[in-house]
Image (cartoon, rainbow, N blue to C red):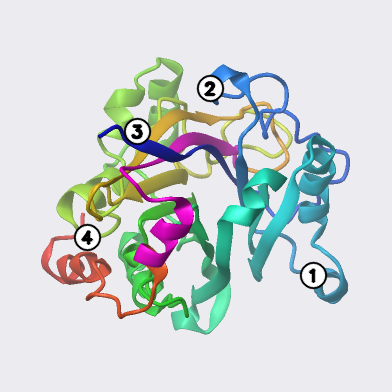
Amino acid sequence: MTATIIANLCVYILTWNVGTHHPDDISMTEALSLNGTSSCPDQRLPDIYVVGLQEVSTHAKNQLFNIFHDDPWTFKVSEYLIPYDYIKLSTEQLQGILVMMFVQPKHEPHIKDVEAQSTRTGLGGLWGNKGAVSIRMSLYGTGVTFVGAHLAAHDQKLAERIEDYNQIVNNHHYKTPKYRNIFDHDYVFWFGDLNFRLTGTDSAWDVRSLVEQGKLEELIERDQLLLVRTTGNAFSLLTEQLPTFPPTFKFIEGTSEYDLKRRPAWCDRILHRVQELRYPDIVLNITQISYKSHPDYVLSDHKPVSAAFLYKIEAQTQTDDELYELTHGGGTTAAPLASLDSENARLAPIY
């Protein structure tokens, strides 16, 4: 029997630490690939945009304004997407961590159970300067969550980053039956300023020299995120297409010159996961079609990073409404797969 394609969507994710700056006169055209550079099939625009920002200004005046209005960054992204007929589906903010989602109107009838959640990890879970916010939903009958995170900073804080990750996994809970936890979802996208640095004793000058020589593979082998995924300490349930672009941190603001007060590193990352054969006669698939930085942006000490994915659902007989009944139709969730990472975090050595 020939499978029916229930959905074949292009999902575009952008993450950027904006360093408390306001958008002001900045253009988002290139960052959102609205200039004909979309990697989606036939160069069409994405079906879904998810934008995650870190270090959004939390000045008291802005917080009061945001009670009644969107954050200025949400206004800015809306300004660029609304003319292309996108609608704002949801936004969620935890202090400086902001996630927003825009969709083409034709997909709105196929989206249900939209829910936002947040977890604080700063100051032992008391402060939201670090942590995660997420937006989850049923998308064409499947459960998907988009998690935007900002983890502990500085080279020597690897253990704290692992702890932040596990706090988010263990404390991030939703109300939707069968999808109570992050890794209960059929699809997971996790992105943000994850702050992973490089192992080794190279100086900032040494790292910059290797970047200038194009020896990125030599550097990425010492990337902390790759190492903790390999050892199972954190993020081992997720997949990442390794960066082929230069480190996106740390730059002198207003320039594309590295600020050698810190060693350059790939702090800004986008990972994903799909449970491909979770349901009988249904195939869930993700294909990553781009992963790049946007080096022309000099607003903060980070460069924006984007990724595009093809989100495909094939089934023998089900419509997306029937798939929704299968995936969301009551019952309880099995023990969260996230516990695998949590357990390994206590067993594997930290480098």
Q: Which residue is mark 2?
A: 41
**Element type where label 2 sits in the image:** helix
Q: Amino acid at mark 4?
A: Asn
- Mark 3 packing: few (<14 Cα in 10 Å), some, or many (20+)? some
Tell which circle, 1 or 3, labels the residue nearer the N-terminal end. 1
- Real-space Cα separation, disc 1 to disc 2, in angstroms: 41 Å
- Mark 1 packing: few (<14 Cα in 10 Å), some, or many (20+)? few
> Which label is found at residue 37?
none
Q: Amino acid at mark 3?
A: Leu
Tell me the mark number nearer the camera, choosing from 2 and 4: 2
**Element type where label 1 sits in the image:** loop
Q: Which residue is mark 1?
A: 59
- Real-space Cα separation, disc 2 to disc 4, in angstroms: 36 Å
Q: Residue at x 81, y 43 (%)?
A: 82
Does residue 179 appear in this view?
yes
- Real-space Cα separation, disc 3 to disc 4, in angstroms: 18 Å
Q: Amino acid at mark 2?
A: Pro
Image quadrant in which you'd find residue 91: bottom right
Foreground of the two, 294 or 88: 88
Q: Residue at x 71, y 47 (%)?
A: 105
- Callouts 3 and 4 close, C-beta under 8 Å: no
- Callouts 2 and 4 close, C-beta under 8 Å: no
Magenta residues, start to end: 302-326
Q: Quadrant of the N terminus?
A: top left
- Real-space Cα separation, disc 2 to disc 3, in angstroms: 22 Å
